[in-house]
Image: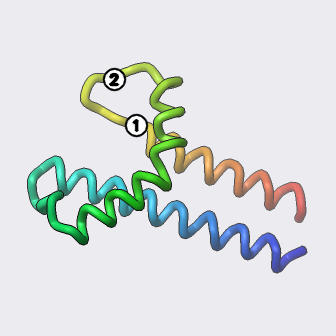
Amino acid sequence: MNSLLNLISSIVDLYCFALVAYVVLTWLIAFKIINPWQPFVRSLLSGLSRLHDPILNWIRSVVPNLGGLDISPVILLLAIQFARNLLFELFF
């Protein structure tokens, strides 16, 4: 059972790192530091948005609009950490 929990924890870590990479990439595009029309950047952004946008869009529909500030990635990271801690509490 311990190895299964470690695998789940590793997958959650990878998802969190990918979410942080997605947020940083969108900031770099918004501040015009990198060109979103380059094939590598476009494919990376497309893959990361397909991975994260369904959950982030659901959070955005629930959370009230704060103007130009999008806190949905922070809420998602907090929810993931809460779920991980809850899972480890139940099994240990």
Residues 42 and 72: in front is: 42
- The residue positioned 62% from the left and 51% from the top of the image is 80
| Residue for point 64% across, 73% down | 10
The quadrant of the picture occupied by the N terminus is bottom right
82 relative position to 31: left or right: right
Q: Residue at x 34, y 53 (%)?
A: 23
- Residue receiving disc 1: 71
Amino acid on which the number 1 mark rests in the picture = Ile
Say which residue appears at 68% left-offset and 68% top-offset.
Answer: 9
Q: CA distance from mark 2 to mark 1?
A: 8 Å
* Quarter of the image with the C terminus in it: bottom right
Q: Quadrant of residue 44?
A: bottom left
Q: Earlier in the sequence, mark 2 or mark 1?
A: 2
Element at badge 1?
A: loop
Q: Which mark is residue 43?
A: none
Amino acid type, mark 2: Leu
Disc 1 residue crowd, few under 14, some 14–19, many 20+, Cα 10 Å: some
Badge 2 crowding class, 10 Å Cα cut-off, few under 14, some 14 to 19, many 20 or more, is few
In the image, taking residue 58 as reference, residue 38 lies left or right, namely left
Asked if disc 2 and disc 1 are in contact, CB closer than 8 Å, the reply is: yes
**Which SS class for mark 2?**
loop
Q: Label 2: which residue? A: 66
Return the residue nearer the eye: 3 or 45.
Answer: 45
Q: Position of residue 33 (x, y in %)?
A: 10, 59
Instruction: Please identify the residue farthest to the bottom as the structure is shown.
Output: 3
Residue found at the very far top of the displayed protein: 64
Residue 57: percent from the left, percent from the top? 47, 35
The answer to which of 14 and 74 lies nearer the viewer is 14
Q: Quadrant of residue 3?
A: bottom right
Q: Is residue 4 left or right of residue 12?
A: right
